Image (tube, grey):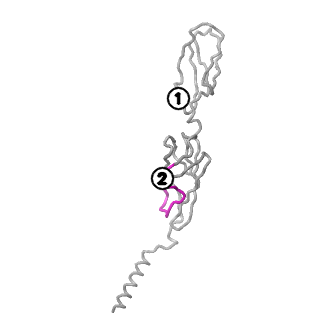
Amino acid sequence: MRTSLLSRLGWAIAALLMVTCTSIKELDDDAHISTVKAEAMAPSAVVLGTPIVDRDEVTIPLIFGKYLFPIEIRVDITTEQKIDKILGLGADFTLEFESLYDINRVDLISLSGVVNSYIFRLQEVPGRESADIEKFEILSWSPESFLLTRNPYYDIINGFVEIIGIDELFPLSITPVITVSDGASLPIYFSESF
């Protein structure tokens, strides 16, 4: 009687296991990134843009902080399908970059065990950290009889603009047109008197 009960119980457990087990053929081979969010953890002054996923590479724009290495970045990875695990991230889902040219490899393991690897890299967004004059021209001046050049000399390193003229009719008013780098802001037109 006990043997028959144990036998039935064994068959019931075996049947339950066969119903709940998934065949390897049914497991998904895909493990692809759909989106990535990035946040600078240390130093906190670093400013990042929205990461770009392109095939097997993820590029994180570095807007500000190219002199602040090493940089620790927390990444939030969203996949297109359910996966088994993600390898290559540090504690709290972080990546560390020792320089602008450093790369990190992250492996996504699919449910079937297939590995998809991604390279994470930083890309500097040019001109965001500088506040330089790129072009300086004089649109107009008063008195108009004042002799001066329309293209003054500007020294980016020492931070000055030298207006060259050969007259002594002061005061002199000028209206310059100044083009500045992407990281700077300045009204397009303004007047200055000397």
Residue at x-position 64% and y-position 24%: 155
Which mark is first along the chain, 2 or 1?
A: 2
Residue 106 lies in quadrant: bottom right
Magenta run includes residue 80: yes
> Furthest residue to the bottom?
1
Task: Give the x, y percent position of residue 2.
Answer: 34, 91
Image height check: is 78 above or below 43?
A: below
Residue 118 lies in quadrant: bottom right
Task: Give the x, y percent position of residue 160.
Answer: 60, 22
Separation (CA) of disc 1 from disc 2: 33 Å
SS of the residue under disc 2? strand
Q: Amino acid at mark 2?
A: Asp
Residue range highlighted in magenta? 73-90
The residue lying toward the viewer, choosing from 29 and 153, is 153
Q: Using the rendered image of the protein, determine whether residue 58 is visible from the camera's viewpoint.
A: yes
- The residue pinned by badge 2 equals 76
- The quadrant of the image that shows the C terminus is top right
Residue at x-position 54% and y-position 67%: 113
Residue at x-position 55% and y-position 48%: 52
Image height check: is 52 above or below 111?
A: above
The residue lying toward the viewer, choosing from 146 and 72, is 72
SS of the residue under disc 1? loop
Magenta run includes residue 102: no
- The residue pinned by badge 1 equals 185
Residue at x-position 59% and y-position 44%: 123
Q: Using the rendered image of the protein, determine whether residue 55 is visible from the camera's viewpoint.
A: no
